[in-house]
Image (tube, rainbow, N blue to C red):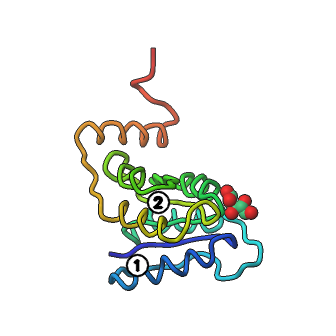
Amino acid sequence: MKLAIGNDHAAVEMKKEIQKYLEEQGVEVVNVGTDSTESFDYPIAGYKVGKLVSEGKVDGGIAICGTGIGISLAANKVKGVRACACSEPYSAEMSKRHNNANVICFGARVIGIETAKQIVDAWKNAKFEGGRHERRVAMITEIEETGKLKAAED
Ligand code: RB5
């Protein structure tokens, strides 16, 4: 498995710990975040993670900023990205099972490293269930690709 990881200045230490944690499990990690605590604009890291995922160069992405919110917004603007900001493992697992999230995001100022590891594991190890969820995820893609949703038209 190959994952991209990106972060801003608020999440340097957490990024390093998560990268190490994944590499110890044999996961290949592509680091596109900053390794400096100098102020760094989170959209750059969110975009880079999203781009690698969108182009199929990695199997998924992890994006961390102070809250997980800004970086998830940026990653979600890249076509084909479904980035979910989660603060606990249940939502992280469901983000894959029901929403087929290909990027998981969290906040280094919100949660601790043990919760972050649980979130990564929950998301990484879960499988998309397809079925009715496939239809709903396809609707999200339709909005992204056409700017409209046929099922919502009167
Ligand atoms: C940086 O101060 C902070 O705004 C950023 O890490 C993130 O929380 C944005 O959503």
Say what secondary structure mark 2 lies in: strand
Label 1 sits on residue? 22
- Mark 1 nearby-residue class (10 Å; few <14, some 14–19, many ≥20): some
Farthest residue toward the top? 154
- Write the residue at 43% across / 80% down: 21
Q: Nearer the viewer, residue 72 or 22?
A: 22
Where in the image, quadrant-wise, is ligand 1 located?
bottom right
- Residue topped by disc 2: 104
Task: Give the quarter of the image for residue 71.
Answer: bottom right
Q: Is residue 99 above or below residue 28?
A: above
What amino acid type is highlighted by mark number 2?
Answer: Ile
Horizontal side, residue 130 vs residue 124: left or right: left
Reading the chain from its start, which is encountered first: label 1 or label 2? 1
| 26 relative to 144 in the view: left or right | left
- Residue 39 placement (x, y as % from top left): 77, 72
The three-letter amino acid code for the residue at tag 1 is Leu
* Alpha-carbon span between mark 1 and mark 2: 14 Å
Near-viewer residue (63 or 111): 111
Q: Position of residue 47 (x, y in %)?
A: 58, 63
Comparing 122 with 96, the one in front is: 122
Q: Residue at x 36, y 68 (%)?
A: 59
Tell me the quarter of the picture where residue 89 sits. Answer: bottom left
